[in-house]
Each structure stands twice: as structure tokens, then as C-alpha cells.
Image (cartoon, coloured by chain):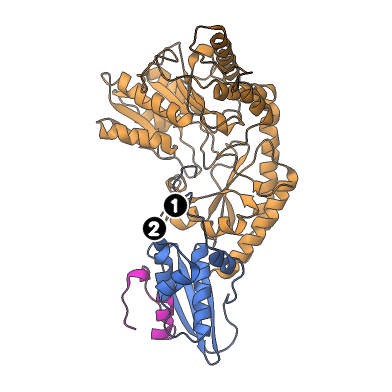
Chain colours: A blue, B orange
């Protein structure tokens, strides 16, 4: 706890902090048809659930992980709601101004989106960040 | 109430203003600024100031002043004690006993010695963080030269029975080193009664400055170590380098203040820590205490909150509070605390753990504020989490 390792790990962008503190798309949703997708990070410390609705366009999330995970899931839900069909990790990282070493959490969110779209409720297995699934 | 509320006294303590005042008196031309190794009058004055500090520290821990070597802190003291003792006694044996839950400043030195051909037995504590004296007895071999175990664990606050360890090592003629960085000034330490041979301490853990500490080296029976830093023969040849009079005077004054009011230094954080624990354990379901509930330093509480990610909780508290997490997030992945993992906690449980530590300047108002903020943050994060619980 008192070593220097990790001392910079709690530096977040303003956008990350804003979404972490007040996410607009926190789930779960109420009644209605949604596509549900779940993904877990390779280390098991990150878990994201996304619910996507097409008509009307809407999205909700639940996330267990660091602030980047929560903020990224909120941004993914926002992009879907705005009409984006394909949510990619790089878009989330760019949108939040995240450092490259945080890409793992955004890949997990991308996997959750894919899982929702592919199966309409199917899950990506644990370690899903590495799973290469067809679009 | 000043924010952020500082509840990380186990990481470091603020310098007491009375200590800062003494230190300031050793820096400028009007003060005791000269080199303590100089023969002239100002040098002698600086030397007297250093020796005064040595006596003050010795009094706090029940030692003789000449048994103390000033260092740059507990990390250097641990290096000198462990590597120095191992090298001095290498012809007699090359086996060391320590534990999985020591500070990195002990673990990394032992690992380096392993690379140099020493064997190390790594004791594993029970689920509450305690190492039984029997474990030490069973680990000792004919070629064991050193046992190094901490008095108070830096993450849990768990207190080990070093006096019992010392009885065993003394019987076998083996040195016992104790890392007491988290103990001095927080618990009574009496080396006149404890059979401890080498003991590390640090000023910044007990209201002194960073960058100074000491190694206690018993004279009877003599605990011999080989110096690691050469060049000038300071500190009886065991730690060369010009003595930092202002730092040492600061450590001495911090020790004097602690000696004068040790009973209050133990009681005050103990009361506040119990208030904090009561508030959090009663205010939240799925909240647990890590470590031994009784054998603990008074001011430290390590708690875990089911269904919460530790980094997210720290971030949620960050603008208002300063506490420590049970994981050290590295560049790629969160790395759960090796101390909590050694107790048998899962990665998820270790990551969901937070260390709160209170001290001399903590108030009941700050503790109540912390309880309110933690309950609110845990509740919010659980609502956001697929693994969450209701509060």
C-alpha cells in the first residue's frame, strides 16, 4: 500500500471523472425489450453488463471496475443511444482521454456490446477482452 | 473541518509543528547547522544535538543511546539489518526466516539474498494475519542465522508477538530483526525487556520528518552486521555519510513528544478507530474487518466491502478523503495486495479492501464525516455494479 507503485493510477481525465460521478445511463432498465450483453476482463476484476434497446433507441449499463470502466460503459450507452451501431474500444478511450494502458477495460465494454448485438442476451466468456468475435 | 480528511496515518504522518520548529533550528546560520563530525565549536554543538536526539529515541524504545544507528528511514534500516546480518554471519549459515506479509523493504532484501545463494523460509500467517511462535520454532534450522518479522503489519495493523519470537531465537543463538516502522509511537516498545536484536524505525510514521530513521543494534548480546554504506566511518562505522542534524533532531523531538504522552497516543486513535469501525460495520451490510480484531495497532482498520471495486471506492472518496486501497493498480492490471492474498482473501476481496488509519490530529468530527461519505459511496457503487449488494 505504501510503495510508489500505482501512485499515478488514480489520475483521471475530467470527462472520466464527470461520467464516473454522475453517469446518465446507469441501469438496469425497467420494462421493455432490450438486448443484454455481459463481458468480463481477463483478470476478472472488471465486469460490464449492457442493455441495448432499438425502439426507441436507448441503453443502460452496470459495471464493476475502476472509474474508467464506469465512465466507459456510460459513454458506450450514450453512443448507442445517439445511433452508433458499432461501439469500439478506441472510440471510448479517445472520448474519455484515457491512457493507452487502460485499453483493456474498453475492450471489455466493446465485448459487452458485441455480446448484446450477437446473441441478444448471450455472454462473452471470462477473459472476453481477448475473444475475437465476428461483427 | 479541513478537507480532504486525512485517514492515511499508516502511510505517513504530518510533521508535528513542535518537531518542525526544532528542525528549523538546525538549518540556518543562526541555528545548529554545522557538520556534527567537525571538531570546532559549532560542530560540537551539532554533535550534542545529534546525541540528544539519540537519547530521546532510545528512551522511547527502552534502548541505550549507543545502540542506535541513524539511517535514512526504515527501508535503509531493514536493508542494513537483514543484508548486513546475513553477510556478517554467512560463514555460519545461509538460512533466513521471514514471512509473506512483511513490507517490501524486507521481502525484496530477502529475495536479493536468495539470488546470492541464501535460502529463505517464508512463513504464512493464519487468516487473521498472525504468525504463531511455533511456526518460527519449526522453521529454524541449524544453518539459520536470522529471523526477520514485523511487529505491526503496515496494511492490517496486526500485532505480532515478537517477544515470544525472541525467546525462541535467543534460545537458538539466532538474531531476531523486527521491522517496527508501524509500531514505534503507536504501541509501547520496550527493548529492555524484549529479546530483540535488531529493530528498524522511521520518523515519518510518528510525526517526524521523512528521510530519517534508525536501526537499533543490541550490544549485549552483540548483534553484529556488516555495513552496507562505506566512506567516513560515521555511526561507529556502520552507516557512513554526514549526519543530517535537522532530520535527526526532528526524529528526536518526535520521540520526546511520544515518550511524554504515549498513553494518549495509544488511547486517542484507538477510540476513533473503534468509532469508525462501528459506523461502517453497522452502516453497511457486506462490510468486513480484515486481520485480527484484537491484536492490532490502535489506529489502523482494514475493511472490505463486498461488491465494490477498491479503486472505484477510492476515486469516489478522493476529493474528500485520503485513504489507501487494497490493490496497487499497475500500468496494465490491478494487482491485489499480497498481504491480503496471503491471508487467503480472493483477488476480488483484496481489491474491495480499504485501509483507514487515524492518528494524533484526527477528530471525531472527521471520523463521522468519513463514515457518512464511505456509506454513501459504497451504496452508490453497489447500485452501479452487477456484483453489488444493497446497503
Question: Where residue B36 sits in the image (x, y, percent)?
Answer: 51, 14
Q: Is disc 1 surrounded by few (<14), some (14 to 19) or many (20+) residues within 10 Å? A: many
In the rendered image, the vertical position of residue B308 relative to residue A95, given as above or below: above
Q: Which residues are magenta?
A: A111-135
Work out how far the residue at label 1 is from the one at label 2, CA to CA, in angstroms.
Answer: 13 Å
Q: Residue at x 41, y 83 (%)?
A: A86
Residue at numbered disc 2: B332
Report whether residue B217 is seen: yes
Between A85 and A66, the one lying in front of the other is A85
In the rendered image, the vertical position of residue B253 relative to residue A47, given as above or below: above
Is residue A46 shown in magenta?
A: no
Chain of the residue under label 2: B
Q: Residue at x 44, y 69 (%)?
A: A93
Question: Where residue A61 sits in the image (x, y, percent)?
Answer: 53, 76
Question: Where residue B349 sits in the image (x, y, percent)?
Answer: 49, 55
Residue at numbered disc 1: B336
Q: Residue at x 44, y 52 (%)?
A: B336
Q: Secondary structure at mark 1?
A: strand
Amino acid at each position: 500500500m505504501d510503495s510508489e507503485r500505482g501512485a499515478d493510477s488514480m489520475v483521471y481525465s475530467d470527462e472520466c471523472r464527470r461520467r464516473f460521478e454522475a453517469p446518465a445511463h446507469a441501469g438496469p432498465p425497467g420494462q421493455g425489450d432490450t438486448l443484454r450483453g455481459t463481458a468480463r476482463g481477463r483478470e476478472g476484476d472488471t465486469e460490464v453488463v449492457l442493455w441495448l434497446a432499438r425502439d426507441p433507441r436507448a441503453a443502460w449499463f452496470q459495471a464493476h471496475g475502476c472509474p474508467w470502466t464506469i465512465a466507459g460503459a456510460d459513454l458506450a450507452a450514450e453512443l448507442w443511444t445517439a445511433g452508433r451501431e458499432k461501439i469500439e474500444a478506441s472510440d471510448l478511450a479517445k472520448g474519455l482521454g484515457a491512457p493507452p494502458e487502460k485499453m483493456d477495460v474498453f475492450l471489455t465494454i466493446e465485448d459487452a456490446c458485441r455480446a448484446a448485438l450477437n446473441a441478444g442476451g448471450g455472454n462473452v466468456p471470462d477473459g472476453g477482452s481477448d475473444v475475437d468475435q465476428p461483427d | 473541518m479541513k478537507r480532504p480528511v486525512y485517514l492515511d496515518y499508516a502511510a505517513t504522518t504530518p510533521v508535528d509543528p513542535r518537531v518542525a520548529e526544532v528542525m528549523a533550528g538546525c538549518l540556518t546560520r543562526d541555528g545548529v547547522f554545522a557538520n556534527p563530525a567537525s571538531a570546532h565549536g559549532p560542530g560540537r554543538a551539532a554533535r550534542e544535538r545529534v546525541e540528544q536526539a539519540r537519547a530521546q529515541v532510545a528512551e522511547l524504545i527502552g534502548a541505550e543511546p549507543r545502540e542506535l544507528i541513524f539511517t535514512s528511514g526504515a527501508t535503509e534500516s531493514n536493508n542494513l539489518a537483514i543484508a548486513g546480518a546475513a553477510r556478517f554471519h554467512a560463514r555460519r549459515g545461509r538460512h533466513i526466516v521471514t514471512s509473506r506479509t512483511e513490507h517490501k523493504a524486507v521481502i525484496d532484501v530477502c529475495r536479493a539474498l536468495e539470488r546470492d545463494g541464501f535460502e529463505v523460509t517464508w512463513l504464512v500467517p493464519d487468516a487473521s494475519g498472525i504468525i504463531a511462535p511455533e511456526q518460527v520454532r519449526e522453521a529454524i534450522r541449524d544453518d539459520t542465522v536470522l529471523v526477520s518479522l514485523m511487529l505491526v503489519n503496515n496494511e492490517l495493523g496486526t500485532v505480532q508477538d515478537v517477544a515470544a519470537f525472541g525467546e525462541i531465537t535467543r534460545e537458538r543463538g539466532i538474531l531476531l530483526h523486527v521491522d517496527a516502522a508501524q509500531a514505534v509511537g503507536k504501541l509501547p516498545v520496550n527493548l529492555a525487556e524484549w529479546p530483540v536484536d535488531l529493530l528498524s524505525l522511521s520518523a515519518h510514521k510518528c510525526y517526524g520528518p521523512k528521510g530519517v530513521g534508525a536501526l537499533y543494534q543490541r550490544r549485549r548480546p552483540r548483534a553484529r552486521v556488516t555495513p552496507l554504506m562505506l566512506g567516513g566511518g560515521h555511526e561507529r562505522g556502520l552507516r557512513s555519510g554526514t549526519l543530517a542534524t535537522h532530520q535527526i533532531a526532528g526524529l528526536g523531538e518526535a520521540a520526546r513528544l511520544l515518550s511524554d504522552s504515549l498513553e494518549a497516543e495509544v488511547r486517542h486513535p484507538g477510540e476513533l478507530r473503534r468509532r469508525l469501525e462501528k459506523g461502517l460495520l453497522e452502516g453497511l451490510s457486506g462490510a468486513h474487518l480484515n486481520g485480527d480484531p484484537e491484536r492490532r495497532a490502535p489506529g489502523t482498520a482494514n475493511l472490505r466491502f463486498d461488491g465494490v471495486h477498491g479503486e472505484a471506492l477510492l476515486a469516489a472518496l478522493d476529493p474528500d478523503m485520503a485513504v489507501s486501497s487494497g490493490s496497487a493498480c499497475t500500468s496494465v492490471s490491478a494487482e491485489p495486495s499480497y498481504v491480503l492474498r496471503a491471508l487467503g482473501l480472493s483477488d476480488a476481496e483484496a481489491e474491495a479492501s480499504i485501509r483507514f488509519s487515524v492518528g494524533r490530529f484526527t477528530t471525531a468530527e472527521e471520523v463521522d464525516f468519513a463514515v457518512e461519505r464511505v456509506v454513501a459511496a459504497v451504496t452508490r457503487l453497489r447500485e452501479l455494479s452487477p456484483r453489488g449488494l444493497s446497503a
